[in-house]
Structure formats: structure tokens, C-alpha cells
Amino acid sequence: MASPSEFDEVYAATAPRLIGQLYLVIGDLPEAQDCVQEAYARAWTRWDRLTRDGADPVGWVKTTAYRLAISRWRHYTAGLRAMARHGVPPDLPPPSADAIAVRDALAVLPKGMRAALVLYYLGGLRVAEVAEALEIPQGTVKARLARGRAALAGLLADPAGTEGWEMTHA
């Protein structure tokens, strides 16, 4: 089994060179850094297989980094083509003070509760659909919604602002 220090040594010895090579190919240093970092993160999860029988993992990492860069480039160019076909999206107005207050209040809540509230109230999903999306029982969704509403009521400056948060999608 490979040790974390072996991974660290390979990373330190090869990442800068790989970033430089990828930068020369794609012309974007932050993107090259991101692709190499992602490739090493993926390598870490399978490090034992990549180094089995003394194999050199750098080739796998290099191939993965290049593939990530190509994939990202394809997504980027597809976005450019879509923008050329449909035009630049209209400027959106900044979020309202109420939207910012709700965002800030939601950020304080536990992730699971926040996800249930957003999927149900903003995503328009039913309790059963939220349960399926989060892979939790419907009763847990209902409990998170009830506790989340109560927590939001306490966090938001205007308690009357929680009107309309009733469970209507059940």
C-alpha cells in the first residue's frame, strides 16, 4: 500500500512540470492548474492501483489532466456557440434585499435542512420528490422543512416574511 508521503513526493516532483506543459497547450494558467489538481485528486483515490507493481502513475495523471482540459474546452466552446446562436443573455437585476436576507439565513442552517427547504420551496418539488432527490425518508423531509421554517422565522428580521412557507406541495 502506497503511503501519503509517496503521493506527496510524486506530486511535488511532477505537478509543476505538468502544469507548465498543460499551460502551453491550453494557454490558460489557472485552468491548467485546476486540471492538474483535479487529475491528482482523482489519482489519490486510486493511488494503490496506479502504483501497483512499481507502475509509474504520472502517465495516468498526465492523460487525465489533458482529458480534463479538453473536456472543459469543449464545454467552453459549446457555450460560445450557444451565445453566438442566441445572443448574450440579458443583464439580470441584482438580488433584492429580501433574497439576500433569505440566502444569508439559509447559509446558517445545516446543509441537509437547507437542501430540503430549497428543493421544496424554490425548486417546487413535492415532499416525495425531495425525499427521493436527497435519498432520505419522507418523514425526515417533513421534519427538516418544519424545523427549517422555524429556524428561518427566527433568523429573518421580518417574521411576517415567512408567510407563504406553508407545506402546500405535500
Image (cartoon, rainbow, N blue to C red):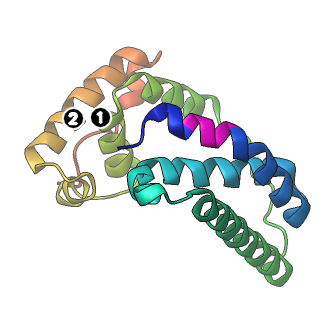
Residue 10: x percent and y percent? Answer: 62, 43
Amino acid type for the residue under numbered disc 1: Met
Q: Is residue 138 left or right of residue 125?
A: left
Q: Decide whether residue 162 is among the magenta residues.
A: no
Q: Is the magenta region chiefly helix, strand or loop?
A: helix
The quadrant in which residue 67 appears is: bottom right
What quarter of the picture does the C terminus occupy? bottom left
User: Do callouts 1 and 2 mark residues in contact (Cβ within 8 Å)?
Assistant: yes
The one nearer the camera, 142 or 164, is 142
Q: Position of residue 146 (x, y in %)?
A: 20, 32
Q: CA distance from mark 1 to mark 2?
A: 5 Å
Image point (64%, 41%), residue name: 11
Q: Which mark is residue 31?
A: none
In x, y percent, where is residue 115? 35, 42
Reply above or below: 136 against 58: above
Instruction: Report the front residue among 165 and 72.
Output: 72
Residue neighbourhood size for the residue with mark 2, other residues' Cα within 10 Å, grouped as few (<14), some (14–19), many (≥20): some
Quadrant where the image shows the N terminus? top left
Q: Residue furthest front?
A: 54
Task: Identify the residue shown where x is 23% and y is 50%.
Answer: 168
Q: Residues within 10 Å of mark 1 (few under 14, many from 20)?
A: many
Check disc 2 and report the residue beneath it. Answer: 144
For image coordinates 81% across by 59% down, the residue present is 22
Magenta highlight range? 8-12
Q: Quadrant of residue 61?
A: bottom right
Of residues 98 and 76, the one nearer the viewer is 76
Amino acid type at circle 2 is: Arg
Q: Position of residue 33 (x, y in %)?
A: 75, 47
Q: Secondary structure at mark 2?
A: helix
| Circle on res. 113 | 1
